Image (spheres, rainbow, N blue to C red):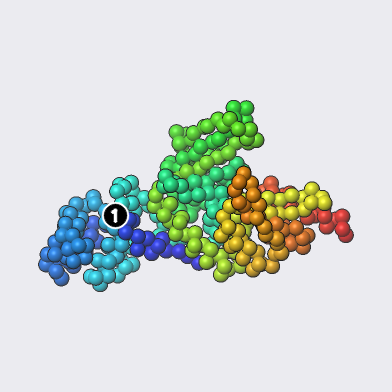
Amino acid sequence: MIVDVYKIFRNDEKIRVNICKEFKSLIRKKIDERYDSITFYSKKITNSSHVLYNYFRNDRLNASLYLLSKICKDLNINEEQLFSNIRYFSLQGGHIPIILPRIIDINENFMEGFAMFIGDGCVSKKSNIVFINSDKNLIKFFIKWLINHFKVDSSKIIVTIVTRPELDYTEYLNILKNANILENKINIIYDKNNIKKPCLKIYYPMVVFRKLFLNLKSIMKQKALRSDKLMRSYLRGIFSAEGSVRFNLPHKEVYIEMKDKNEIEFICKLLDEIGINYRKYNTSRKSRNFFKIYIAKINDLTKLSSMRIFGHNLKRQKILDNGVKEYLRMHE
């Protein structure tokens, strides 16, 4: 399964693109041949006689992908020809060139990473995409996932390490160094609260990526429902980020607790599809409502163990695996 990123953005009027000079000249030539006057055509297609006139006079100007798609359709220029001549993206009012992958392969690795982001990430109002976690394996996986699947420039990734003076965060610094995160992009904040271990906030401050992630969320859910492998990958990602396990006999359970009711409902749908029994109920914490899924039957826990429900969260996966083995050994 694949997703064409350019097609996601072709109807977004705020997304700008820079196209190859030769292709830009071809568009201008076809406009002149058919309409004679660039100002007339600009008025016809944009309601302003100056928009296209200024665009074709200045090679440094970017244009709305939506507008260019509209023009190419009107001039009988194949959309694929337009897409193949895009050099880079930007946003309305912005001038920072952003390279996006044309095609994203929706494989198991991508689905797991995206679900992990849904669990422990967010798209902030300040136009960042943000991932927050303290597990070293998840941090390594997410940074690698971001770079490999989205062609992200590691020099633009910003990281804040929230810690206490007495906590050692050297291993986290080594992870960031190995991922080629620039030293001047790493900030250390000392928290007054009694945190048990350092926590990392990973930022990628690009508005275009924020818009892309928002668009991909519904697409990924649709893809997950159509494939058993992607369904399981989604569950691994979301449980690695938000799931928990307790196996102190007689208590044995895997559970996930979130504020997002819609996300909990979607997880329930996936668990139904793969035949996992669960209980769902509401909880309240600090005057806020949470929704919890609770899985406790040994047959279901055995299934979760075999499918590695906690994915790259090796610590929780080990607790589940050892707990299931011990329970089965005691009840032979």
User: At 45% from the left edge and 33% from the top edge, which residue is drawn?
Assistant: 184
Place of residue 178 in the rendered image (x, y in percent of width and height, measured from the top left): 53, 40
Check disc 1 and give the amino acid type. Answer: Asn
Q: How far from the left and from the top, in percent, is residue 310?
A: 66, 53
Density class for disc 1 (Cα within 10 Å; few <14, some 14-19, many ≥20) is: many
**Mark 1 element type:** strand
Q: Which residue lies furthest to the bottom in this view?
A: 76
Judging depth in this view, the residue of 78 and 238 nearest the camera is 238
- Which of the 4 image quadrants contains residue 226? bottom right
Pick the front one: 308 or 25: 308
The residue located at (27%, 62%) in the rendering is 67
Q: Where is residue 324 in the image (x, y as percent from the top left)?
A: 78, 55
Q: In which quarter of the image is residue 108?
A: bottom right
Query: Mark 1 sits on what residue?
Result: 18
Q: Nearer the viewer, residue 223 or 181?
A: 223
* 332 displayed left or right of 154: right
Q: In which quarter of the image is the C terminus?
A: bottom right
Instruction: Report whether 217 appears left or right of 65.
Output: right
Q: In this view, does 92 lie to the left or right of 140?
A: left
- Residue sitting farthest toward the front: 287
- At 39% from the left and 52% from the top, the residue drawn is 208
**Residue displayed at 50% across by 67% down:** 1
